[in-house]
Amino acid sequence: MITGGNRLNGEVTISGAKNAALPILCAALLAETPLHLSSIPALKDVVSTIKLLEQMGVKATCNADKVSLDASEIHTKEAPYEMVKTMRASILVLGPLLARFGHARVSLPGGCAIGSRPVDLHIKGLQAMGAEIHIEHGYIEATTAHLPNKRLQGARYYMDLVTVTGTENLMMAAALAQGTTVLENAAKEPEVVDMAECLNKMGAKITGAGTDIITIEGVDRLSGAVHNVVCDRIEAGTYMVAAAMTGGEVKLLNVRANLLDAVIEKLRDAGATVTSDTDTITVKSDGKLKAVNIRTAPHPAFPTDMQAQFMALNTIATGVSKVTETIFENRFMHVQEMQRLGADIGIDGNTALVKGVAYLDGATVMATDLRASASLVLAGLVARGDTVIERIYHLDRGYENLEEKFTKLGASVKRIKGLTG
């Protein structure tokens, strides 16, 4: 429940990135000695990933934001449906299991209902490296038994679509392949770069991460390492938009401004003041915002994971804006809920036309996916009266201690017992 109308002021510490932590946790499967990680956010998806790894035989030790993973004794190379159905990122165990052990059986994944995120690019990439793969009874069965030394073979692979998890999965697989692998049209996201940095600390030979061509020279074995996960740029962006919308001044700690160039530019266009130094960003606003057009595209363009938050900003900004979504086809499910709060939004295909209104009114709304739920929180912060958001398990998948962080900044946010919450 959120009671709107409070300006946000103060400091907030940004957690490690979920989208970097999940693949890096899976990378532990490649190592013969323990991998020590820090800045691991306390999120449901992280807990689910660690449980999945433990089920395979990984020994996990967790202490606050630190996690140590020992995959020296793996007793099963299977990721069952019960563990995978809630989280698409589980597909990330496929590459490392196949590369290190020569066999993997991984359930086809579930996750947010925001559109088609095909795993065929993962499969085709592994097949290009020589893997034999069949899909039977909802499971991906993969083996390298027929290959020289039973190991994946280096290959050149062009990805038809830019895919972050596909890039990460194939990068992990290629790290232990025989020969050199070149991934073309690779994802350039900071989380991909962070994973490459971690793998290189483990003994991998990866160059080009952050560009659209990544080259991986396979090695015989990987060891554990010590790695601090990069900050969560989407969590950071969400608090930056909240500061702008409420007319407050918020300083973000443990954050890198160079990961948020597109978001910062749009906030400045909207009328907010944004300043930064090495690991902080400060957002200041009088709450009088101008509508900004948004078009999502792969990094370094405007991130799809910030689209819903900026739509919330546009609902109370002066003017009319176009929000165009080019990544996921079902990513306007928050529109219907925002309309319940009084937003004036029309949809035409993959574009939403948002006309700013003088105010939003609190109502009961329902979260439909992770970032949609964040946009409803932002709308609730500025709406008149109380907003109740149901199904907040979506929020818990991507935002660590959200109500505590917002409360510390002066918002009126509390978790209440509900029928579906």
Image: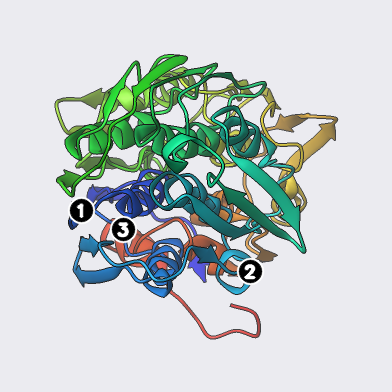
Q: Is residue 405 left or right of residue 211?
A: left
Residue 92 seen in the current view: yes
Q: In the rendered image, which quarter is residue 292 located in?
A: top right
Residue 373 seen in the current view: no
Q: Earlier in the sequence, mark 3 or mark 2?
A: 3
Asked if labels 2 and 1 touch by Cβ distance under 8 angstroms, the answer is no
Q: Is residue 54 left or right of residue 416?
A: left
Q: Is residue 361 left or right of residue 280?
A: right
Residue 37: which disc?
1
**Towards the viewer: 385 or 178:** 178
Task: Point out the residue furthest to the right here.
Answer: 348
The residue where tag 2 is placed is 81
The residue where tag 3 is placed is 41
Rendered position, 192 above or below 421? above
Which amino acid, mark 1?
Leu
Label 3 or label 1, whichever lies nearer to me, is 1
**Towards the viewer: 195 or 400:** 195
Q: Label 3, label 1: how many angstroms apart (C-alpha)? A: 11 Å
Asked if labels 1 and 3 touch by Cβ distance under 8 angstroms, the answer is no
Q: Residue at x 35, y 71 (%)?
A: 57
